Amino acid sequence: MSFNLTAGNPRAHRIRVFFDETTTIYEGMPVCYDWDSTTNWFGGSMSLGEVSETNTTAEGAHNEGKYIRVKTPLVTNFHAFAGVVAKGSPGIGQTGKTAIDIYVPNGAIVPVRVGVNSLVGRTIVGLQTGLTYLVAPIAVEDFRPLGVACETDATLAATPSIILTKLEPNMFLSQNFSTDLYAGAGVGAASWLQGLNHLAIETAHTSGGWDTLRIATNASGVMAATGGACSINSYLKVTVPSDNTAAAVYYRATLSLTHLVGSVITNGSAIITGLHSQIGGSDDVTCGHASALWADYGLTGTITGLSEVLHLSHNGTGGQLNQMIYMRGGADCTYLMRLDFLTGGGDVGPIVDCAGDVTVTTDDKAIAISIDGVLYYLIAVDGIPGA
């Protein structure tokens, strides 16, 4: 038996659409569907079974122009990515409205116009507003990842050109558009809207490590300006007040919950945490701060009610709580705790001098605390008594 292999691309699928702009058309150029158009294609519109001659179709009346007409990428149509202009397509080199053939984004490796230097199998490319070629990730509001370059080429940044690319937007989770996607108004006061991107996994793993979601970020660039890197950036915007006066309403940018069921866990040495934040490494590092956990309070408006940088609460009823806070300092730990003077004014700050007290010196400090709403002070001395 023999196989007849050809230079064809059996997975690549091309369709014909209509380019509805006056922009020069290039091979490999990305285009997006005109998804919010009311301009139809067949020159007619149907209402109550009657067809009338018109170039527009009312919103909600199934306008076929939405999936026939395509345009250059904009933030508003990133989510309606249609494909890239196929090799040999009609219209290539023309400027104006015309029919074109496109490769649909189905995971096939196809020729794509790219404007960033690429490494085979590594360089992510995607849409940027107004460009007729794909670029590397930029500001999240103006970029949509589409695929991975399948060739190495160090000349593309200077002159955008064709390179084979695996075109598969579903490789990436991207739901950022010009306006927020709408999840509805809920179905009842007691209902919990389950995660829109939902992972529900059970594992019978018996040794080693295991993750439901693993995010590994390698920050390999030398930062020369203000900025930084986040492996996870969790952002919650609250735009309306709560009207529930009977019970607390929680708005959380991140909720981490570990749920223990029955008497399953019998290992006395098991370490169970709701949140485990860890920093590690063995190389020498020079930096301003290296923190396993950083809590930063940045509100600037007037807050009515309690406001705290850190809130600890013991709400359990099934057993004794041994510690609210557990701290362990190694031999190379300079301080077990560090408190700095805070700015902002006020008559009584969190740290004050102990001048005039008969048992301490003026170099000692008093740390303000509240117990059941009453102000008290913890005394910190600048030397070990009797030493």
Image (cartoon, helix red, strand yellow):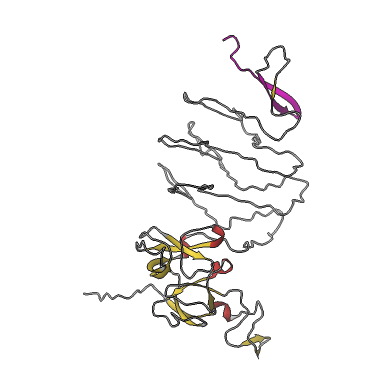
**Which quadrant is home to the N terminus?**
bottom left
Q: Position of residue 341 (x, y in %)?
A: 65, 30
Q: Position of residue 185 (x, y in %)?
A: 69, 60
Q: In the image shown, does 224 or 48 lie closer to the viewer? A: 224
Q: Is residue 186 above or below residue 327?
A: below
Q: In the image shown, does 254 or 368 lie closer to the viewer? A: 368
Q: Name, please, the residue furthest toward the top.
A: 386
Q: Is residue 239 above or below residue 382?
A: below
**Which quadrant is home to the C terminus?**
top right
| Snapshot quadrant of residue 187 | bottom right
Horizontal side, residue 165 vs residue 45: left or right: left
Q: Is residue 202 above or below residue 326?
A: below
Q: Name, please, the residue furthest toward the left.
A: 1
> How many numbered tags mark residues here?
0
Q: Is residue 334 magenta?
A: no
Q: In the image shown, does 94 or 59 lie closer to the viewer? A: 94
Q: Position of residue 246 (x, y in %)?
A: 77, 46
Q: Residue at x 55, y 26 (%)?
A: 336
Q: Position of residue 140 (x, y in %)?
A: 54, 58
Q: Is residue 383 magenta?
A: yes
Range of magenta residues: 364-387
Q: Residue at x 65, y 42 (%)?
A: 298
Q: Residue at x 65, y 77 (%)?
A: 60
Q: Residue at x 57, y 84 (%)?
A: 41
